Image (cartoon, rainbow, N blue to C red):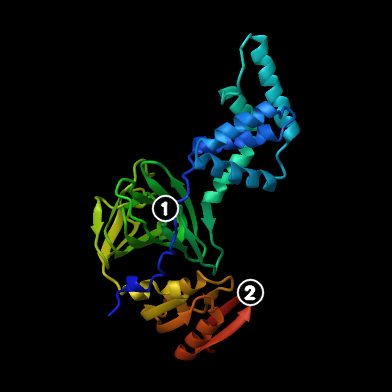
Amino acid sequence: MNSPASKLPLPPETGDAPPRVTPDIAAEAALWVARLHGPDRSPAMEREFRSWQARSAAHREAFGRCTETWQDVALIGLATAYDTVASVRASHAARGLRNKTWRWSAAFGLAIAVAGGGMLLQHWREQDVYRTAIGEQRLIVLDDGTRMLLNTDTRVRVAYGSAQRTVEVRGGEALFEVAKEARRPFVVHVAGSEVVAVGTVFSVRFTDGPQDRDALAVTLIEGQVNVRAAAGRGADGLAPDQTTLLRPGDRLQLHHAAPIQSLAGAASLDRPNVDQVMAWRRREAVFQDSALVDAVEEMNRYSRTPVVLTGGIRDAGLRVSGLFRTGDSAGFARAVAALHGLSLLERNGRLELANVR
């Protein structure tokens, strides 16, 4: 029998890894773009630029990406940027400072950052934030070959450094196929917890609702991960009391304990049907004798047309089993109505289930 992990998409074949662009190189590239688009461009400047560009593939990659971003950001005020830079240079000259070659001085960098380069770099940083809309799925392959599959209404931010690969899950659900790098662990920050891996396959789901309804679930499919409290977590974070080691098939669930202000969340460790938990990869939702309230909440994650239980149905203890297409709220509502003899009414942009009068 195939394991659940065997159903995951295989990583694409790739050649050499792309050059790694550090924040410092990105900043230098942004400043070169600004200089080369300015009024002081000269053959000497171009020679200096070519020398900088020839130092590494990372320099060339950063410059290419910054140039694309510069062209996309129409709000950068070049005139303001260069007026500010001119003021900085004049100030240096007045104090007798020599400037034989252009350097990444703090004042010059600040002038560009404030007047325009800062907007460019902010725009570029946002390129490391990935989102999905309600009902959307998105596959992202990171620079190291790690694959992220984002489920509906998900937002993550990627920050790779020389010592650690970091992803912050700000809401939603994601499946990670982590490329193995023993010297650079892969860490997911979410809701006050850290999920630490090297080479493994796991999913993270964070329900970011009212504070007392926040919930976090980490499901391990392959390999091994540690889940622990993140340093500097707030009082409203979710974290286990102690580091928890997960093995394939384990799921760690965290929710707020009473009182809510407790630093530690209430934790439970179980071994669910992984294929059912991960059915969203196939755009399916599987329910097995599930509370109707929970099934409705799950289906509503994938649609802007919510199913609403009215007339005391929420407290009726109804249950549902079956396989449904995510996003097909109408089909789900019709099936539930037929199963429990309910009426179904579509109005005000929602599907209302009620007892037949």
User: Is residue 334 shown above or below 162?
Assistant: below
User: Is residue 130 shown above or below 292?
Assistant: above
Residue type at mark 2: give it. Gly
- Residue shown at 45%/46% (left/top)? 159
- Left or right: 98 as drawn, with respect to 139: right
Nearer the observer, 310 or 21? 21
Numbered marks: total = 2
The residue carrying mark 2 is 349
Q: Nearer the viewer, mark 2 or mark 1?
A: 1
Nearer the observer, 239 or 168? 168
Q: Residue 273: give x, y in percent of width and height.
A: 31, 75
The residue carrying mark 1 is 144
- Residue shown at 66%/43% (left/top)? 70
- Residue shown at 50%/42% (left/top)? 58
Residue type at mark 1: give it. Asp
Question: Residues under labels 2 and 1: Cα distance?
Answer: 43 Å
Label 1 Cα neighbours within 10 Å, binned few <14 / some 14-19 / many ≥20: some
- Left or right: 169 as drawn, with respect to 72: left
- Residue shown at 42%/53% (left/top)? 144
